[in-house]
Image (spheres, coloured by chain):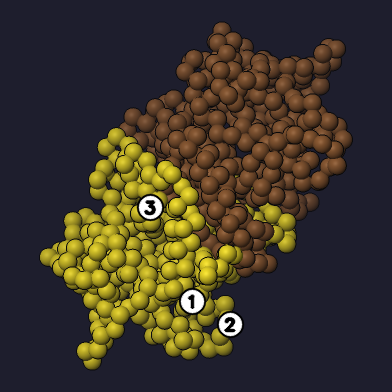
Chain colours: A brown, B yellow
Amino acid sequence: MKNNKIGMSHGAGGEVMGNLISETILANLSKKSVNGGIGLDALDDGATIPLENHEIVVTTDGHTINPLFFPGGDIGRISAAGTINDVAVMGAKPLAITNAMIIKEGFPIEDLSKIIKSMDETCKEADVGVITGDTKVMEQDKIDELVIVTTGIGIVEKGKAIRDSGLEVGDKIITTGSIGDHGMSLLSFREGFGFETDLKSDVAPVWGMVEKAIEIGGVTAMKDPTRGGLSNAINEMASKSGVGIIIQDEAIPIKQQVKAVSDMLGIDPYEVANEGKVIMGVKADLADETLNAIKKDKYGKEASIIGEVVEGKRVLIETPVGGQRILEAPIADPVPRVC
Amino acid sequence: MKNNKIGMSHGAGGEVMGNLISETILANLSKKSVNGGIGLDALDDGATIPLENHEIVVTTDGHTINPLFFPGGDIGRISAAGTINDVAVMGAKPLAITNAMIIKEGFPIEDLSKIIKSMDETCKEADVGVITGDTKVMEQDKIDELVIVTTGIGIVEKGKAIRDSGLEVGDKIITTGSIGDHGMSLLSFREGFGFETDLKSDVAPVWGMVEKAIEIGGVTAMKDPTRGGLSNAINEMASKSGVGIIIQDEAIPIKQQVKAVSDMLGIDPYEVANEGKVIMGVKADLADETLNAIKKDKYGKEASIIGEVVEGKRVLIETPVGGQRILEAPIADPVPRVC
């Protein structure tokens, strides 16, 4: 029997959320794309609207992160970077974001100021403008501190948008850096673990790095592995592309501290959000060159080829000793509201 | 001494909100426009990004309305129409909206379904696509039911965007219909007044009507009179254009029931939100023709020329008996969260 109320898992980026979206949202909407662009049904990182020789790329994200300030960033940085990155993984140059804030009555104006400054720093780094916005205030008992919804606008040459569904058999899979940093650092910070840690969020705007990779000419698919983490991103890419993927477990860069927190909590680091990483498919003959281009970017130093696209339908993960297991898409994000 | 916490008036669309926006938001952002388009500093209904022979028009709005369902509409309709209208009053054809929802855990899926259907109906009417979105769920004590943030994307020929600052001395001021319907109907419904009323929100997507008006060629300025109502819109248009305006009080269309509720509550109907109306400046020699074009649209039947642009700095309102008073911009919306 279906649950008729929204649960936390409906917002967690996994299978439960996927069902809500297809049954309650997609099924009730008639017009979901414009002028033949990429639309809502694609459930890609963004949508596109063809205009003259370009496609306008549009993406939107609600940020409900708790706490608002965390090691490595704050809600201002994540609101800007998250949206900039969703535009970037569509292969488009991010131009602008919009900033809609819903603020709790009584929220300190000094904190708001810090958050806006952080948003500004992040946008400056990516040469992105904050061009319009909206501010609403809700009563103290009606909202938790601050929610920020950003929408990103970018452009790409017509027909050059990069989908999450473009993988082809033989492509190599690249991660642009270590996995699980954002989710595990947030969780560790929030739970107030007693041990010393310098673990911090990887939140960063990655268009500069993505642009270097695209220029090589071999990128076939990209995805921003936020909610649901690497597991969700890679499974979506595989199923949308109609292919299988084999991942080498030992090739996945993962920080020692991420592993430690993950072991202690029994939470899979591949299932938690990343905020400054990209998962890419790249043509095999250009994979090394693309990897080198990524490594030249400050956010790409730990980039690695982690696997290969094969025929089939499953994402398999191979351990160093030769074992193989299925890497399932998470049912729901085990760490609610870290992005 | 400045209050250092956010208050309800900071989100209410009046002077207090204006100060917060300029001191805490605008002052902390560096890049506020892109490629010479209309940017955040303009505080217009939307921003523009020039691209080839067009300008992309972008606008965003957070919808925190309470209750979610009300006479004449619901949060789905207002989220779509509000954003479509902000694009429309920039003189741009709305193409698409994005839909970011923040939902309370436990929210009935049936209600969510109704809201999406209503959003769809509204978008269909305006031939607008819902092309991308985001869904977040927050715990029961962290959010009030449902917040929807929509971002609208439209296009206009380069250089043809219509500002709220384009008024020139001699222009006529048109309202496309009766004033105060949305705010007063919401308030009357929410307060559960015991008298019979068929008062309902005017929420509607008005691009069709706006397009008819623009085609005549005389529209110099437009604004969507939502938060802060007619008073706020007309004062913003005047001060941004560097002109004065004289309004004829008896020319402002206002429903008898709106007047009744307004008298009873002591709330100025000119200060509450409208959701399906436009305030326009029109060249005097094309004013009648523009008015007639508007009246042919189903949402423009009660359109009226209500005043004239003059030299000066003030918005004055003339009563039928010849009196004159200043129509001040509201300090804060007297009816919080009706849009």
Q: CA distance from mark 1 to mark 3?
A: 25 Å
Residue found at the far front of this picture: B1
Compared across the picture, whether B44 is left or right of B111 comes to: left
For the residue labelled by badge 3, is the local secondary structure a helix, a strand or a loop? helix
Q: Mark 2 vs mark 3: which is more N-terminal?
A: 3
Q: Provide residue A165's location: percent of width, then percent of height.
A: 57, 26
For the residue labelled by badge 1, is the local secondary structure a helix, a strand or a loop? loop
Quarter holding the C terminus of chain A is: top right
Chain bearing mark 3: B
Residue B122 placement: quadrant: bottom left
**Residues at marks 2 and 3 touching, judged by CB atoms closer than 8 Å:** no
Circle 1: residue type? Pro
> Residue at coordinates 82% horizontally, 33% vertically from top-left?
A262
Residue at mark 1 shares a chain with residue at mark 3: yes
Chain bearing mark 2: B
Residue wearing tag 2: B192
> Residue at coordinates 53% horizontally, 61% vertically from top-left?
A136
Front residue of this view, candidates A93 and B120: A93
Q: CA distance from mark 2 to mark 1?
A: 18 Å
Residue found at the far left of this picture: B285
Asked if residue B321 is positioned above or below residue A325 in the image, the reply reads below
Asked if residue B174 is positioned above or below residue B25 in the image, the reply reads below
Residue wearing tag 3: B41
Q: Provide residue A54's location: percent of width, then percent of height.
A: 37, 31
> Residue at coordinates 23% horizontally, 92% vertically from top-left?
B321
Front residue of this view, candidates B283 and B256: B283
Residue wearing tag 1: B334
Asked if residue A225 is positioned above or below residue B324 in the image, the reply reads above
Circle 3: residue type? Asp
Q: Mark 2 vs mark 1: which is more N-terminal?
A: 2
